[in-house]
Image: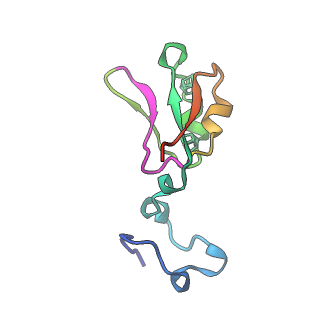
Amino acid sequence: MTRQQTAKPRWSELAVGCAVTEAGSARYNRTGDWRSSRPVWEHAHCVRCGVCQMFCPEGCIQFEPPKDFPAADLEYCKGCGICVHECPTACIRMVAEEE
Ligand code: SF4
Ligand code: SF4
């Protein structure tokens, strides 16, 4: 069953243990709502190795034209900071979300 999620589910709609029960359901969970800080790139030091993209648990980092530097889709970036931790050139930092 696929459900377009326009509002947050009620507790009674959640699977036991909040288990993921359908493939691709993460697309409907706007994990960006969880974020308290966001990644910011310093492109001058980015070597475009793709490590940040490979490690991002949300798969939300894309290389954007015209210069093909990485950027996060903030609808889905949950602010975990894994990209910051894994970047070999330390060109990503986390900044707090504004209220
Ligand atoms: S891991 Fe760092 S250097 Fe590699 S593409 Fe991502 S931001 Fe650039
Ligand atoms: S902070 Fe986490 S979710 Fe956001 S882009 Fe980096 S690795 Fe992905």
Residue at 55% in and 79% down: 14
**Which residue is at the far top?**
44
Please tell me whether residue 63 is drawn above or below residue 99 in the rendered image: above
Judge by depth and name the residue closer to the eye, 55 or 99.
Answer: 99
Judge by depth and name the residue closer to the eye, 64 or 37.
Answer: 37
**Residues in magenta, as a range:** 67-78
Q: Main secondary structure of the magenta part?
A: loop
Labels in figure, total: 0
Please tell me whether residue 66 is drawn above or below residue 78 in the rendered image: above
Q: Quadrant of the N terminus?
A: bottom left
**Which residue is at the far bottom?**
12
Is 69 part of what is drawn in magenta? yes
Does residue 82 appear left or right of residue 30 in this picture? right
Q: Quadrant of residue 2?
A: bottom left
Does residue 17 appear left or right of residue 79 in this picture? right
Does residue 70 appear left or right of residue 20 in this picture? left
Find ligand 1 in the image and state its quadrant.
Answer: top right
Residue at 54% in and 55% down: 34
**Which residue is at the far left?**
66
Judge by depth and name the residue closer to the eye, 88 or 93.
Answer: 93
Is 13 part of what is drawn in magenta? no
Coloration of the structure image: rainbow
Q: Position of residue 38 (x, y in %)?
A: 53, 39
Q: Position of residue 57 (x, y in %)?
A: 59, 48
Residue at 53% in and 18% down: 46
